[in-house]
Amino acid sequence: MKRRIIMTMITGLLLLSGCSDPGITQNTNISSEQTSSTTGTTSTKPDTSNPSASNTNKKYPTDDLNIARVPVELVKAVDGDTISVKYEGKTEKVRFLLVDTPETSHPRLGVQPFGPEAKAFTKDIVEKAKKLELEFDIGPNRDKYSRLLAYVYADGKMVQELLLEQGLARVAYIYQPNVRYVDKFNDLQSISRKKAIGIWSVENYAQDDGFHPEEQESQSSSTSDTTAKTEQPSNVCNIKGNISSKGDKIYHTPESPYYEKTTPEQWFCSETEAKQAGFRAPR
């Protein structure tokens, strides 16, 4: 009897021991699934180790606009910020929206510093372009002088942006609602100003109310004492040779509207002599 009882107890202990193994395996599997789940969550998390990577090129809301442009035929470049075109069968002047360049033929202001450079830059772009187009904003497309107001494209590139990048124009005449690209224009202007190129190479020349040639004059006179200039050899040799900030060699005769304001690097006795030295007449 005792043997039967002992055998029964041993058998029961063996059965209990065999049933405990699946429980251990199940717990191990649960732990493995939780680890796998945690690892998966970590691997799909966005990488923020380089937050500036997506800001290499600044994007603007206007970059993806698909606005119709009007093809036109160039008649001539009038100024840095004005051209003449054939539009709807008529010859029309087009004033570039949101920018202003120094004058070259203003009845009161005359020729301003960097005006000839801005005009030459625009003239070169629009004359070489195979396709010239206008883009109008949502507001009035004419100013008080009946000129067309538009963004001008030469072979797909906006001329306003190119002028701002070269430091040959300032952002100006901001009138709602014709302000589509003003944010981008302001940023381009800021970059040129920091580089101190073009109109920004002369401190306080370009201001909110326009251009101030007197600032260039005062700075030129303040440096003339410390910069060696060629003395005028005689009364006959009265043609001034000047080298602009862009490296352009330009000569000025006494009849030039900019003659008195020009500080010469070299004097010439004739226009022929100036041309032979690589100088050109002002445009």
Image (cartoon, rainbow, N blue to C red):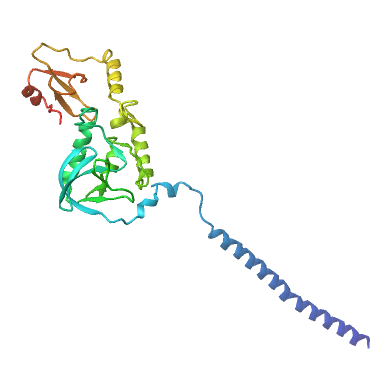
Q: Quadrant of residue 264?
A: top left
The total of numbered circles placed on residues is: 0
| Relative vertical location of residue 71 with respect to residue 273 in this rendering, above or below | below
Horizontal and vertical percent position of residue 137: 32, 50
| Relative vertical location of residue 182 with respect to residue 238 in this rendering, above or below | below
Closer to us: 72 or 143: 143
Closer to us: 66 or 7: 66
| Relative vertical location of residue 227 with respect to residue 153 in this rendering, above or below | above
Horizontal and vertical percent position of residue 276: 8, 25
Taking the spot 34% from the left edge, 31% from the top edge, the residue there is 209
Image quadrant where one finds the C terminus: top left
Horizontal and vertical percent position of residue 213: 27, 24
Closer to us: 147 or 235: 147
Q: Quadrant of residue 281?
A: top left
Horizontal and vertical percent position of residue 49: 51, 49
- Of all residues, the one furthest to the right in this rendering is 1
Q: Quadrant of residue 219?
A: top left
Taking the spot 54% from the left edge, 57% from the top edge, the residue there is 45
Closer to us: 232 or 40: 232
Q: Is residue 89 left or right of residue 208?
A: left
Image quadrant where one finds the N terminus: bottom right
Taking the spot 90% from the left edge, 85% from the top edge, the residue there is 5
